[in-house]
Image (tube, grey):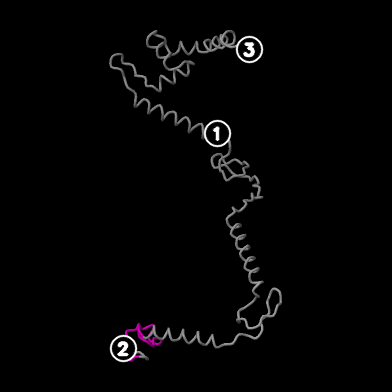
Amino acid sequence: MTKSCERCGNDFEVTPNNFKRAKYCADCRKIVQREQLRQYKQQRRQQAPPATVICQRCGKTLIGKRRNCKWCDECRRIVNREQDRRSRERLKQRAQPKPTTKSEYVPQPKTRTCRYCHGKFTSINRTTICPECKRIKHEEFMRQEEQRQAKLRQKNLKIDKATGKPVKTLEDWSREAAACNLDYGTYRVLVEQQGKTFEELKATAGIRCTSAHAHNRGFGETHL
């Protein structure tokens, strides 16, 4: 849509929403805005300030000051310092972390019904399993986990072609050595070179531990 400028008379494009408000083209609009601003400043200069102004802090009478004057020169400096101090205090308070207060709410035990045995029990949380059923479920889970681990070990088991016996892994050697109270290297030497069995070494583990303890107390250490 086109409309004629009220200042220069040239046609200019205008949107339907601004058709009623638009009066000037783009060039004339800038000129008119500058003229309006110059006229506004001139009117403000022509307005005479009030004859007297009273300071809001000390009550001193000021003559020939501007309209928006609130304080005298001395009070203005004091007020500015007070405002700066309050601003710094507010910034410090915002920077400090807010103190966390513990909630005074104390949960009360409630009577609940077990979803497995349908028995009544009390609890402060939202659990729906009684302690007895929880213990049974845990034991069942651990039993299933052991069976799963055993199946995995059986699946990954290697058979020695010469002897037909399963080949022990490093984890198996370490587990058996810990059960016999021996380190890995000593246990493997006793089994492979001296022909000892796991059952024999495990049976003598308690005797070996007791004798070593007595030897340390009698000869290796000095007790006062």
Task: Kindly report the distance in space between the C-alpha atoms of the residues bearing marks 3 and 1.
Answer: 46 Å
Between disc 1 and disc 2, the foreground one is 2
* Residue 155 to residue 215: above or below: below
* Residue 13 to residue 86: above or below: below
Q: Most prominent secondary structure in the magenta stretch?
A: loop
| Element under disc 3 | loop
Which quarter of the picture shows residue 194? top left
Where does label 3 land, which residue? 223
Which residue is rendered at x = 52% and y = 87% of the image? 43
Query: Which of 161 and 184 lies nearest the eye of the viewer?
Result: 184
Which residue is rendered at x = 38% and y = 26% of the image? 153
Where does label 1 land, which residue? 135
Query: Which of 55 and 113 lies nearest the eye of the viewer?
Result: 55
What amino acid does circle 1 point to? Arg
What amino acid does circle 3 point to? His
Which quarter of the picture shows residue 120? top right
Q: Are marks 3 and 1 in contact (CB under 8 Å)?
A: no
Query: Residue 67: x, y in percent?
Result: 61, 82
* Residue 165 to residue 122: above or below: above
Give the magenta-colored segment's residue range: 8-27
Outermost residue, left direction?
161
Where does label 2 land, which residue? 11
| Element under disc 1 | helix
